[in-house]
Amino acid sequence: MTVFILRRLAQTLLVLLITSVLVFGGLFMIGDPVEILVNPSADQIEKERATKALGLDKPLHEQYFGFLRGAVTGNLGNSFVYARPALEVIFERMPATLELAFLAMVIAVVLGIPLGLYAGLRPHSVVSKTIMAGSILGFSLPTFWVGLILILVFAVTLGWLPSTGRGPTTDVLGLQLSIFNWEGLRYALLPAINLALFKLSLIIRLTRAQVREQSLLDYIRFARAKGLTNSRVIGVHLLKNILIPLVTVVGLELGSVIAFAVVTETIFAWPGMGKLVIDSIFQLDRPVVVAYLMVVVFMFIMINLVVDLLYSVLDPRVRLAEAKG
Amino acid sequence: MMSRSPLLQVAGLRTEFATREGVLPAVADVSFDLARGEVLGLVGESGSGKSVMGFSILGLIDPPGRIAAGSIVFDGVELVGAAPESLRRLRGKRIAMIFQDPMMTLNPVLSIETQMVETVLAHDDTPRAAARQRAIEALGQVGIAAAAERIHQYPHQFSGGMRQRVAIAIALLHKPDLIIADEPTTALDVTVQGQILYEMQKLVRESGTALVWITHDLAVVAGLADRIAVMYAGRIVEMGDAAAVLDAPCHPYSRGLLDSVPAATRPGARLRQIRGSTPSLLSLGPGCAFRERCDRATKACAAMPPLTEHDGRAVRCVHPLELA
Amino acid sequence: MSAVVAPVAVVETPWLRFRRQFAESRLALLGLALLAVVVAIALLAPWLAPQNPYDLAKLDLLDARLPPGARAADGMTYWLGTDGQGRDMLSAILYGLRVSLYVGVASGVIALTLGAVVGVLAAYLGGRFEQIVMRVVDIQLGFPAILVALILLAVLGKGVDKIIIALVTVQWAYYARTARSAALVERSKEYIEAARALGLSAWRIVLRHLLPNALPPLIVVGTVQVAHAIALEATLSFLGLGLPPTEPSLGLLIANGYEYLMSGKYWISVYPGIALLVTILSINLVGDQLRDVLNPRLSR
């Protein structure tokens, strides 16, 4: 088991390294941030001073190695725009994105699994067909457009929920989070629903497909032949088999939700990492973009690792194979 | 013959499946009795309806299938149309079933302990520890060594033969009156087959449980069954005392089955097989289902022969082979 | 013995069976019909649109932000209203549909070809090559698509070809993985061994056997991916990356209308959104049924 984890960590470092090279090199080509940051009417001396101050006068590979040296100590450079360590800027915004992603996943799972279960157990009922039709719709609607419609309907027309921004925060375990108080929740609800819709549809469809597939298998019939109640057959035998692939998907989708928050945060003006990175791309604030990618890629890989570990905990066939091997 | 009423009375059972191409009569007009402690061998090829027969008794026919007609009386209680809860209470407690492939029938992600204890607790209100003890004893009974340790393991950690023993142990947990075994040895190696057969024989004799052994292999039921019923295309075509049927079958199909066993021919002689192939249940005409493959068929076979009983032997044929 | 002749069943070719099974779902048929309409519109846009939205000379700022049904000075009806520059929404949507569809399908086809070739080759050649390729695929799939596309477009800039490159980069890995799995299943079958023993060239085996068998799952993946690509392109355009304002896709149109939402001029964003929705929905409906029909595991 430890060998497995160590090997994974080594792979993580490799991937991070490759990513940093690609991103660093790529961003180098987009343009001159000095043009954006410095007053266009400034003269050449001003521009040169700014260039020197930002370290942009050095050749590319020197800049990169400087970056690497800093990275080892946890310093990924200073933001051009905020004149503060890029990592600091990102970590400041991270709780906002994470709480949104978390809320979205909770909505998707809590609603998705029961709905998918029902649609799988009674595939021909009207309710099931409605659920499936709804899931295709949720799958096909582009997230950003749904966000617009949500704002239009709930904020502009009905006025029930606020349209943009993040609500007041409370201190939870040392982090400033807004979803644990009612007012903050009101602000978070629309963007979270927006983010959740796609995943909700995915989970409904996956659960239903799994139920349909597993219900045909012999062990279900055997369980009924033993005289077990229906609720036990479905709630224990079927569910445990379904949860294994489901957990894998949910875990992987969590990473995708964090990335996709970029869009939702832009529409709802939610002050998270996503909005930050979009702004940074347009402002050519390279350190922030690079730092963001490093952080997100790292989180992604960690999530994958946890999912793999969870999989081996849940599925006894995998667990014992690894123990032997 | 004992004057007690039969344990199981099946009369005119008809189980259908609604498919896109029409209604499929998997079991049609099946009637038989089973006494307490009796072993019935239900023999037939795939598609003969024997498995569906087993599931029908347990009420495990799901849509698009349904029991269309007939009655199944178990210990005086009518099972067809009974309330689902009363059927559930019977299953596993008074009627148990053993399936063909134990790898597929045991849930791969639950431990053996979980799967056995839940069976006990589904019908008896005993503390968990007592249930576990019962389970360990049952495992010991079927010959699984170190049962107390192995009970914590998972199905894939057992060999095929061991898994089937576990399935048998589960079936015996509540000491049922009737066990339906659907091809329990088909998926196993020949040597293991022999062991399981022996175990089953011993257990059944010791506990007086009635057994319906469903198989396509005549050799398997030869030493085990008291009576044999041969099924073809959803109907019983011959039924009688096991030794008698095997010695001198009356129905041409049973004769064909016996003749096709390799042991019946001299070494070097050609193997005998029944010509033609099993008809599709959807395209059966009104007459005897076997007539296309029968050398004795005449115009009289264009009408479905009734199951006629004579001297303890029931045959569904208008030209049966003579009893010796 | 007189035998009763059993009725001979009508021979159903695989194609006929496929058509019959596909038609079992009315939703799928609806999707197919919608899709046909969408494609037809996209192809015929220049002839269907009442106005060429890119012809700057025709635009009149005085006509800007008119609600649906309003009339222009020259008598033309703006069926779906006008946008911030006075463009007829209907025409803009028709042309936008064209661009969106073109980008989605083009990137899908290129990604499929690329991914299929790589995947099948990896399955056939095995060894080091396969390991390296699949590692790359896994890493690529481990990245969220939107991030990859974001960075690529930030680097490459705007343009139809650039966004196609970005979309292909994001998608090819799915095709590669699917193609490889399907080809692996096929490769282990005995007739491939026989073919190799007969000395058939690798290319022939790959082209005539492995590739055709990888096709059904690839088609299923393809429909879903094209829908995703269209949605992704719309999202990227909305964020301001990818397509230039001279060739607006539906996403860009929606973005342009965003600022007018609050003031009640919903039509500038909502109608392009509906067009986008119908396109993606129809592709998904068709793709869904395709997946069910081509899935060997569901008993039919």
Image (spheres, coloured by chain):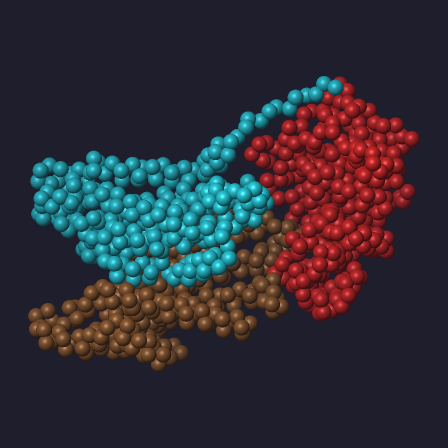
Chain colours: A brown, B red, C cyan
Query: Is the residue C297 above or below the residue A97 in the image?
Result: above
* C146 left or right, relative to A218: left
Q: Quadrant of residue B277?
A: top right
Depth check: give the residue in front, B272 or C286.
B272
Residue appearing at x 29%, y 45% in the figure: C102
Depth check: give the residue in front, C171 or B4.
C171
Q: In which quarter of the image is residue A182?
A: bottom left
Query: Is the residue B289 above or below the residue B10 in the image?
Result: above
x and y percentages locating residue C69 in the rendered image: 17, 41
Depth check: give the residue in front, C109 or C235.
C109
Q: In which quarter of the image is residue C59?
A: top left
Residue appearing at x 38%, y 56% in the figure: A197
x and y percentages locating residue C113 in the rendered image: 39, 47
x and y percentages locating residue C239 in the rendered image: 25, 58
Residue appearing at x 81%, y 49% in the figure: B210
* B300 left or right, relative to A58: right
Quarter of the picture holding the N terminus of chain C: top right
Q: Residue furthest front?
A: C199
Residue appearing at x 59%, y 59% in the figure: A236
Does residue B2 show up? yes
